[in-house]
Amino acid sequence: MNKLTLLICFFACAVIVALFLAPPGFLLDSELTAAALIVAVLVLWGTGVIPEHLTALIFFLITMLFSMAPNSVIFSGFQTTAFWLIFSGLFIGLAITTTGLGNQVAVKVASHLNRSYRTTVMMITFLGVAFAFIMPSAMGRVILLVPIALSIASHLGFAKGSPGRIGIVLALLLGSFIPAFSILTANVPNIILAGMAESEFGYTLLYGPYLLLHFPVLGLLKALMTGWIVGRLFDDQPDKTGLDALPEPSAHHPAEKRKLAILLLVMVLLWFTDFIHGISPAWITLTGAILLISPGIGLLTAKQCTEKINYNPLFFVAGILGFGAFIDHSGIVTRLADLTLQSLPFNPGDAFQNYMLTALIATITGLFTTLPGVPAVITPLSEPIAQLSGFSLESVLMLQVVGFSTLLLPYQAPPIIIGMQLAGENMGHAIKVCLILAAFTLVLLLPLNYLWWEWLGSMG
């Protein structure tokens, strides 16, 4: 256990003790117990001192033994579309690898990446951004792009666990997710915000104005910063020794790759048009997985599914999602917000201070609710915040985006977790990049974004 992990554990213990020593009435007894468990689980996931899926199982066990929430809350993750997306994605990723389609795509992509590693990483980051425009589902993007990223890394000569491979995975993963908060249709929190803003205040978010307001800084500049950070942290040179063997395209009939390519194309088209037919990407992906494993027509054998698929990520994802539902059920975040909102240093005469404070409130809320929960907590508080800050309701609603697009830890974002699990790489690398990117965002990008909003006349 390194010094940073020890420090985090010590801090967590201090927080738990402080919760129980808090003045009477600060939290109810049941809320204190829930808060202590929340802090403990966050530390275990954040430090990785035990495997992530084991932490999820411990969370299930404790909450059920002590009846801390109903079964429908604790195990709600198993009922979500995200769980079935990752379940189906395991089979699709295996098919992309075993048929050699991923290798073939990677060879074509990599042929245009014969530059320095840092330039390659930057190009891969913007490949992810491009997919965010054409594919609305973040989970769908992860499922499709991670196998291709792994094939690109292998084609360029990076073995599993090498800095070069980790950097390529993170560049494509983060590039397709973090800048996508500036694209209205591309991430779940954006959609939740749009729905709640319309249902609670009658305010309709439009694609074009939303893009103009958020993309130049939170999209474009953040993508550039992501590529730069990843390129510097994981700068590497290919090492052919010990390289994982890629499936040889010649070992499979070309018809298999064509069949899989057609299936993926149909799935992407259905994902892209879900606003027309209303079918969730999860059920589209599950249908594709069923076709892949069906005897006689599928491309995967029972032996391949048994031996080559690691099902541990499923428990981790279910745990993360159940954990978010548990936090919401506990009512802690809303209660703490009610207790602290009036004591925050809002100053109607200082627009920049109010801007930073509102963004930080949304950012910190995401630590307790995960990112999709931020609009659920902050939107009902938007009118009080508007009154305290002197901002318009529209500005406060849009400041949520500034907050929940500042990702502090990967557990807040299931697509990042799923991507790293599918890639089989250590979550600690994603934690490092997220923390560094968040620091740069708070110090540099948020002030630049404030100036951009001022120039547009959107502050106030």
Image (cartoon, helix red, strand yellow):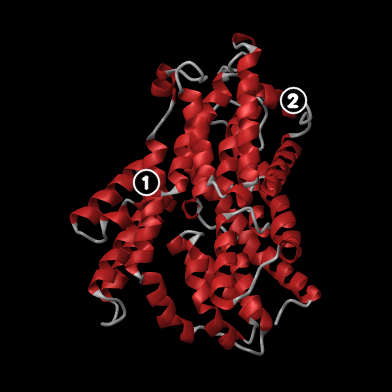
As drawn, the label of residue 78 is 1
Q: Which residue is mark 2?
A: 108
Quadrant (top left, top right, bottom left, bottom right) of the N terminus: top left
Q: Quick check: 380 above or below 168?
A: below
Whether residue 248 is situated above or below residue 387 in the rendered picture? above
Label 1: how many Cα within 10 Å (few below 14, some 14–19, many 20+): some
Q: Is residue 171 above or below residue 395?
A: above
Q: Is residue 42 left or right of residue 416?
A: left
Identity of the residue drawn at 26% across and 61% down: 69
Position of 402 compared to 452: left or right?
left
Query: In x, y percent, where is residue 395?
Result: 66, 76
Q: Quick one: SS at disc 1?
A: helix
Determine the secondary structure under disc 2. helix
Q: Which residue is located at x 45 percent, y 18 percent? A: 295
* First in residue order: circle 1 vs circle 2: 1
Residue drawn at 70 percent across, 82 percent down: 460
Provide residue 22's location: percent of width, then percent of height: 29, 78
Evaluate whether residue 371 shows in this view: yes
Going by the numbered disc 1, the residue's amino acid type is: Phe
Q: Residue at x 77, y 25 (%)?
A: 111
The amino acid type found where label 2 is placed reads Lys
In the orientation shown, which residue stands out farthest toward the bottom? Answer: 349
Frontmost residue, 72 versus 103: 72
Considering every residue shown, the one lying at the far left of the view is 65
Q: Position of residue 89 (x, y in %)?
A: 50, 35
Residue 428 in the image, given as x and y percentages of width and height: 49, 44
Badge 2 density bin: few <14, some 14–19, many ≥20, Cα 10 Å:
few
